């Protein structure tokens, strides 16, 4: 982002960018990120009396950046609170305040694996509740059953798949916010690029992981949403649910091809690796920050990606140590091999969706198709 003035707020040198929401030069930003990972803090040689313009002392330089970052967060929180109190809701009478936005609780000292676990379960709860509530009245589940997770699975349809995709993407925004602290400080453009990029692999990873538990031995059946599935034996019904059936036979063949050559290999790869919950959470955490170099994101994103991939691997190794797994190198290597195979299938999935669009299974303006671009 281009700064309003040309001076770094930390050291006073020329700068034309923001880092973590603070107007600072790249040198100060890199210094801050590296320094906050130190276990031993710096000491001020001038007892806190360093020059307020140029900071020769590393401690004062770090403290200045920390203070600016704290002020930025306090200002943003105050602005948000003022907006919540002053802006009328569009869904309720003007005398009623708008509904509060969910803010995840702060959990000091919690590992990234624990944060990913909490966020992943939140995504599942949101998807389950929203999808079951969308079902037609004749198939509507009792609210108690929805809350307890006791419900029936249905064959997916193209309209339902489209709406379920919207629900998934919305929940992934909260997933990222709750899992990764700095995600909330990114620009809207960077947030959307990351979510759009992550949506595709998350769907495949999650579907394979849950399908292996729900449908053992049925490798051509998988979850198209949280509560609906597609099977090679039911491709006819899936195609019939599309808005246009003018390419019916070709569309059925394409759906079966997709399940046989895209879904089956993914299911087999996930089944062969057989990840624990912690390993699966590490997989999706690493995948979120596996950034395509062609994406138009800032350098800050690539630095954050490297940081969080390291943190996830560090906490996964700690989990191995706590559970008595000493030869964990092979497991981590197998995890990355599985990640690579599933990532390749993500690209195949994009091509398959393009064929589905040409066969009128999905329209140009359907949300589920647009997310595959």
Image (cartoon, rainbow, N blue to C red):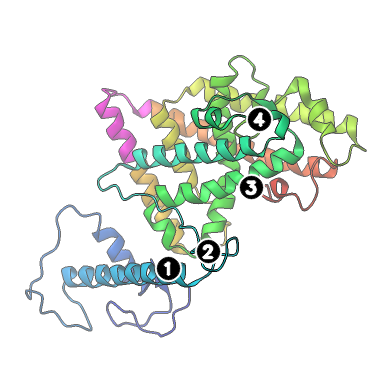
Q: Position of residue 156 (x, y in %)?
A: 71, 31
Tell me, yes or no, if residue 337 can be seen here. yes
Q: Which residue is mark 3?
A: 166
* Relative vertical location of residue 12 with respect to residue 200 in this rendering, above or below: below
**CA gap, disc 1 and disc 4:** 38 Å
Tell me, yes or no, if residue 289 can be seen here. no
| Furthest-right residue in this view | 246
Dot 1 alpha-carbon crowd within 10 angstroms: few under 14, some 14 to 19, many 20 or more:
few
Q: In the rendered structure, which disc, 2 or 3, sits on the residue that comes first in sequence?
A: 3
User: Over which residues does the magenta segment extend?
Assistant: 313-330
Dividing the picture into quarters, in which one does residue 11 lie?
A: bottom left
Q: Nearer the viewer, mark 1 or mark 4?
A: 1
**CA gap, disc 3 and disc 1:** 25 Å
Residues at marks 4 and 3 touching, judged by CB atoms closer than 8 Å: no
Q: Which residue is mark 4?
A: 228
Q: Residue 140 — which label?
A: none
| Disc 1 element | helix
Q: In the rendered structure, which disc, 3 or 1, sits on the residue that comes first in sequence?
A: 1
Q: Which residue is mark 1?
A: 80
| Disc 2 element | helix
Q: Position of residue 81 (x, y in %)?
A: 40, 68
Q: In the rendered structure, which disc, 1 or 2, sits on the residue that comes first in sequence?
A: 1
Left or right: 106 in relation to 364: left
Q: In the rendered structure, which disc, 2 or 4, sits on the residue that comes first in sequence?
A: 2
* Relative vertical location of residue 36 with respect to residue 262 in this rendering, above or below: below
Q: Position of residue 15 (x, y in %)?
A: 39, 79
Q: Which residue is mark 2?
A: 188
From the viewer's side, name the closer residue of 222 and 201: 222
- Residue 150 part of the magenta-drawn span: no
Q: Position of residue 36 (x, y in %)?
A: 25, 58
**CA gap, disc 2 and disc 3:** 18 Å
| Disc 3 element | helix
């Amino acid at each position: 982002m281009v700064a309003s003035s040309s001076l770094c707020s930390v050291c006073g040198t020329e700068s034309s960018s923001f880092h973590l929401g603070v107007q600072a030069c790249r040198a100060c930003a890199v210094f801050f990120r590296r320094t906050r990972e130190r276990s031993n803090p710096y000491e001020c040689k001038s007892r806190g009396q360093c020059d307020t313009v140029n900071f020769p002392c590393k401690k004062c330089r770090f403290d200045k950046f920390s203070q600016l970052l704290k002020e930025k967060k306090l200002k943003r929180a105050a602005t948000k609170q003022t907006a919540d109190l002053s802006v009328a809701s569009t869904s309720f009478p003007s005398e009623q305040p708008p509904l509060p936005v969910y803010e995840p609780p702060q959990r000091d000292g919690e590992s990234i694996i624990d944060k990913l676990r909490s966020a992943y379960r939140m995504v599942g709860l949101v998807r389950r509740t929203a999808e079951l509530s969308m079902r037609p009245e004749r198939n509507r589940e009792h609210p108690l059953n929805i809350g307890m997770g006791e419900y029936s699975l249905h064959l997916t349809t193209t309209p339902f798949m489209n709406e379920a995709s919207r629900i998934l993407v919305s929940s992934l925004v909260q997933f990222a916010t709750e899992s990764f602290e700095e995600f909330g400080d990114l620009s809207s453009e960077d947030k959307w690029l990351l979510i759009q990029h992550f949506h595709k692999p998350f769907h495949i990873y999650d579907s394979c992981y849950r399908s292996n538990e729900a449908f053992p031995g049925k490798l051509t059946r998988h979850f198209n949403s949280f509560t609906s599935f597609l099977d090679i034996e039911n491709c006819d019904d899936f195609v019939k649910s599309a808005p246009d059936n003018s390419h019916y036979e070709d569309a059925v063949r394409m759906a079966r091809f997709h399940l046989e050559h895209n879904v089956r290999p993914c299911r087999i790869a996930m089944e062969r690796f057989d990840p624990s919950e912690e390993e699966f959470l590490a997989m999706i955490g690493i995948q979120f920050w596996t950034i395509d170099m062609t994406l138009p994101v800032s350098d800050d994103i690539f630095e954050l990606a490297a940081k969080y991939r390291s943190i996830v691997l560090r906490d996964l190794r700690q989990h191995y140590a706590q559970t008595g797994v000493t030869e964990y190198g092979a497991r981590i290597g197998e995890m990355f091999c599985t990640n690579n195979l599933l990532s390749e299938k993500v690209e195949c999935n994009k091509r398959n969706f393009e064929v589905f669009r040409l066969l009128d299974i999905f329209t140009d303006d359907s949300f589920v198709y647009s997310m595959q671009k």
